[in-house]
Image (cartoon, rainbow, N blue to C red):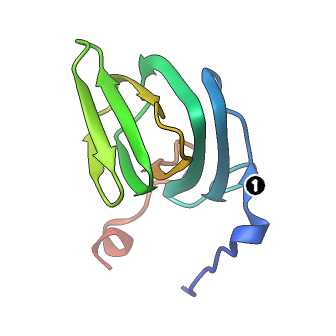
Amino acid sequence: MSIVIAPFEEGQPFQPAGHHGVGPVHLFGGQDYTGAVTVALSHYLPGGRADLSPVPAETLYLVLTGTLSLTDGDGVTHTLRALDGARLPAGTVRSVENSTNLPASMLVIRPNPAAAPTSDTEAQS
């Protein structure tokens, strides 16, 4: 097995439903991607948001720059700043918003539903 490099300039921009003022780019993911995990870099402009909806699978957020508000289905808001992370179990209802005057960037990491199951040997390496 060899190392796979993902140059940023080769990332695939996409537009998920319910996202407004957000520019995501798949670093690992997108069409024809078969890896076990997807990684997207999402840029939230001031006022950018992801509508309240459930995440399809366990999802990890890692804010790289700026500040984002993460609100759960009960209306509880968490403030995530640079290098803060959040783990959302599958089905967690959430919204994300940049209510500041500066852009914010966040990595979004989740399993790839299109990936082939790995063997026990591969999972241990």
Q: Report x, y in % for residue 123.
A: 33, 68
Q: Amino acid at mark 1?
A: Gln
Image position of 69 (left or right of 31): left
Please determine whether, in this image, residue 5 is positioned above or below residue 114: below
- The count of marks equals 1
Task: Tell me the quadrant of the picture where the C terminus can be found.
Answer: bottom left
* Front position in the image: 37 or 125: 37
Question: Label 1: few (<14), some or many (≥20) within 10 Å?
Answer: some
Which residue is label 1 attached to? 12
Q: Report x, y in % for residue 85.
A: 29, 52
User: Which residue lies most toward the front here?
Assistant: 101
Please determine whether, in this image, residue 78 is positioned above or below residue 95: below
At horizontal 67% and vertical 52% (from top left) the residue drawn is 25
The local secondary structure at tag 1 comes to strand
Residue 88 visible? The answer is: no
Residue 124 visible? The answer is: yes
Q: Report x, y in % for residue 6.
A: 65, 73
User: Which residue lies most toward the bottom here?
Assistant: 2
Image position of 17 (left or right of 89): right
Please determine whether, in this image, residue 95 is positioned above or below residue 4: above
At horizontal 33% and vertical 74% (from top left) the residue drawn is 121
Examine the image and state in which quarter residue 89 appears.
top left
Image position of 90 (left or right of 50): left
At horizontal 40% and vertical 39% (from top left) the residue drawn is 68
Please determine whether, in this image, residue 121 is positioned above or below residue 115: below
Examine the image and state in which quarter residue 95 appears.
top left
Q: Report x, y in % for residue 58.
A: 34, 40
Examine the image and state in which quarter residue 75 appears.
top left
At horizontal 32% and vertical 61% (from top left) the residue drawn is 83
